[in-house]
Amino acid sequence: MELHLLTLTIFCVLASAFPPDVLSALAAVEDLQLPNIDAALDLSKSRTNCGPTPCGGIFNAKEQYVPTTGKHAYASPAANQIRGPCPGLNAAANHGYLSRSGVTTLPETMTGLGDAYGMSPELSAFLAAYAIITNGSPLTGTWSIGGPPPSSGGLLGGLLGGSQGISYSHNIYEGDGSIARNDAYLNNGDAHSLNITRFASAYATGLANDRYTLDGFAQDLLSKIQESIATNPYYFAAPFSTTLVVPVAYNFVINLFSNHSAAEPNGYLDGEMFKTFFGVTGDYPNFTWLKGQERIPENWYRRPSSVPYGIPNGFLDVAINFQAYPGTFRLGGNTNGVNTYVGIDLSDLTGGVYHSSDLLDLKSSNAACFYAQFVQAVIPDAAATLLGELSAILNLVNKWIKPITGSVKCRVIGRYDQTLFNKFPGYKYKPKGQATNYRE
């Protein structure tokens, strides 16, 4: 399948990968050798709750305190306010760090996720821009953290069949193997409602000492992927939504939901905080999900702004997971019922430009180069895109995506053979989902 004109335009912007701050972070592990699985496991277990790069003993109570009173007081979402599959976004909206309507903008996403969680501006901008382009409205610059907005104040246009929001972005933004959500096919297309059993299995990883870690969640991710392959005949690991976003989302929970203090500047996540962020009450394993009631804990301190969680952290964390637990790396899917998983090598997908081993590289530059290009392949042909939308998309790319690129020369992919995905039933599965949209 030849790349579309618009995709090629965006590739020219993205092909030089990531900037000096990313490269310096990658250089920190450049000489690291992992000769065997034990070394990889040791590295995974050594990570703090601040990620592969510790917070360095930094704690500033005034700067890191996250207010949950006044304009940021918790409020349960009203009937016309949208919530979706991401507990962090839901909690941010419930506290007014994002619009309480559940429909937000790119600038608000950058400010809100930085203030609430310490996410870096370039990471939040990239994720928001991608959501606007694929699931939102490029014309209005808005996107929904859940399902489609009400028609009275809805988003305009939408490149992928309407402004459906991330709740209905299966294989584009959302993918199989979530920490606490169902695979879409196994729940009548609903991949945004929480599954208490899946939440409980993640919760069990920290029961011994009431502490949750990146390594413990990496093990849970491996278990969830194996479960999906064994129970979901439509299991499909798409190159972005499942291969990358699903493990990144696991890592977000530890890196962004951990509380920080002078005694533990690298942060810690205990069971009560875990439940609070996910809108869950009760004691293990008898939990109850309070739909749409995710919240930020009281007296909670985020990671320091001087050590935000950004793009390099995300790639390093995922690469470490892949090295330590190889079964967490998936690109492919079930072909003919459960337990019929077949993988795809990037070499076949990219005409030999990249290989699957590139995504396992701890230096991560090759992974960054590949993903920076591939995520744009979902954008339709420019000829089928309204002129106003096309201009809005290019503005998003130039203003919010281009600045994160740097001087590294990436190997440019000239052609994707996406026909390789046709053998996977899950590739073509388009769930409609349930029209709950978290509105009672």
Image: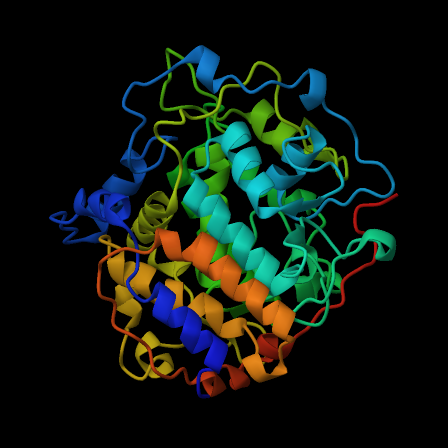
Give residue 47's position: percent from left, percent from top.
Answer: 31, 35
Task: Depth check: give the residue in front, 124 or 434.
Answer: 124
Task: Depth check: give the residue in front, 199 or 29.
Answer: 29
In the rendered image, the vertical position of residue 183 relative to residue 11, given as above or below: above
Q: Name the image quarter holding residue 430.
A: bottom right
Q: Name the image quarter holding residue 196.
A: top right
Q: Is residue 77 visible?
A: yes
Give residue 53's position: percent from left, percent from top.
Answer: 28, 35
In the rendered image, the vertical position of residue 202 relative to residue 75, given as above or below: below
Give residue 293's position: percent from left, percent from top.
Answer: 74, 33
87 displayed left or right of 226: right
In the rendered image, the vertical position of residue 285 relative to residue 423, given as above or below: above
Give residue 158's position: percent from left, percent from top.
Answer: 68, 66
432 displayed left or right of 209: right
Residue pictured at 25% horizontal, 67% vertical: 410
Task: Depth check: give the residue in front, 168 or 161.
Answer: 161
In the rendered image, the vertical position of residue 382 relative to residue 150, given as above or below: below
Quick one: which residue is furthest to the left in this view? 31
Residue pictured at 24% horizontal, 40% vertical: 42
213 displayed left or right of 282: left
Task: Depth check: give the residue in front, 424 or 155.
Answer: 155
Residue pictured at 56% horizontal, 42% vertical: 107
Q: Is residue 342 visible?
A: no
159 displayed left or right of 236: right
Residue pictured at 39% horizontal, 68% vertical: 373
Q: Quadrant of the C terminus?
A: top right
